[in-house]
Every structure is written in C-alpha cells, then in structure tokens.
Image: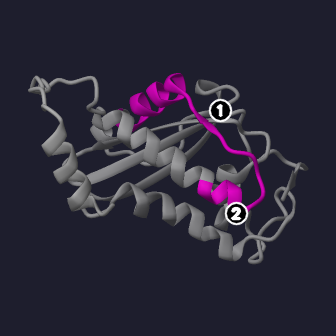
Amino acid sequence: MTGRVWLAAVAACCTLLPVAPVAAASTLSIPSSTMFGMRVIALHNQVRWAAGVRPMQWDRGLAAAAEAYAARLASTGRWGHSPAWQRPGQGENLWMGTHGAFSVDQMLTSWSSERRMFRSGAFPRVSKTGSWDDVGHYTQMIWPGTVRVGCAVRSSGTYDYLVCRYSPSGNVMGSRVP
C-alpha cells in the first residue's frame, strides 16, 4: 500500500486516541552540552577510524578538566598548554579563534587536517616537515593507547577557546604511531 492509502485505511478502521502533549522539558530533549560531546566524539572517531585506530569514549571528568582550563584561558587571555604536572596522564589539544566564527567541526578539522603532513613512524619522527609540532594535534587524536576524551569551549567575547583532554595521553616519545 502507498502511504496515503494506508493512512486512509487506518483512519477508516480505527479510532485515534488523543495524545497528551509532551512537556517542554521532556526527557527526549538532548542538552546542548550532550550534543557537543556527541559531535566531538563522532568527529574524533571518524578520524581514528580512517587511521585504523579503535574508537574513543567521552569522559565527563576529562570534560570538566577541559572546561576549567578553557575558562581560565578565556578569563586571562593567556595562550598555552597547561603544565603537565596539573594534568598527570592527560594529553591536551588547544584551539583558539575569533568568537562565533567557527563551528566545532571547523575547530576539530584544523587538528585533523594536520594528517596531510603526517607520516607513520615512531614519535616524534612522524612529520613530513621534520617537526612533530606540525602534526601533534592529529597524532593525539589518533594515538592508539588513548581511549577517552573530554572537551569544552569557552569564550572571552573576542575569542573562543577549545580545550580537549585525552587519557591516557598520547605523543609519547619513542612510541609508534600508525
């Protein structure tokens, strides 16, 4: 049956009961923070799949740590990685750009696009340019031993800051990157 005929058959044979309206705060709605995390995971795992690496999972604790550091960057205007002793066992990717001008996809693509300069090998000898700094965001995204990620974006009003934390950390000297 076509869709119209089937609907007509249902309407002719059945009594439709009224359905209660769904409240605005339905459990079917997904919070924006959850949507953000779902998108971040989807993009990371797409990059990892292309590299032949198993997928990662979202980690709320890492996301909270990323949020705290993103807020610090936004409030101070200072740019740079957090000290390693403040994030033991965690890797970190940072991004900064004009407030409101970039989507999460564009932010993460800036890291994954480093793939064009990547060559498989033992870290830090993984860049076609000779400088691992040119591929360090990408290698952290695809690091085989990394299994969890959490990220956050905060804004200073002028700039947006994306911070992602990874566990276990990647970019380990002497370790092979696929």
* Residue type indicated by callout 1: Gln
The residue that disc 2 covers is: 50
Residue 158 at what x, y percent from top left?
21, 54
- Rendered position, 178 above or below 172: below
Give left or right: position of 1 versus 82: left
Taking the magenta stretch, the answer to whether it contains residue 88 is no
- Rendered position, 135 above or below 139: below
- The C terminus, quarter of image: bottom right
Q: Nearer the viewer, residue 63 or 87?
A: 63
- Rendered position, 100 above or below 30: below
Q: Which mark is residue 90?
A: 1
Residue 23 at what x, y percent from top left?
12, 23
* Residue type indicated by callout 2: Ala
The residue lying at 53 percent from left, 54 percent from top is 43
Q: Nearer the viewer, mark 1 or mark 2?
A: 2
Magenta part of the chain: 46-71
Taking the magenta stretch, the answer to whether it contains residue 70 is yes
Q: Nearer the viewer, residue 171 or 109?
A: 109
The residue lying at 38 percent from left, 34 percent from top is 34
The residue lying at 42 percent from left, 59 percent from top is 105
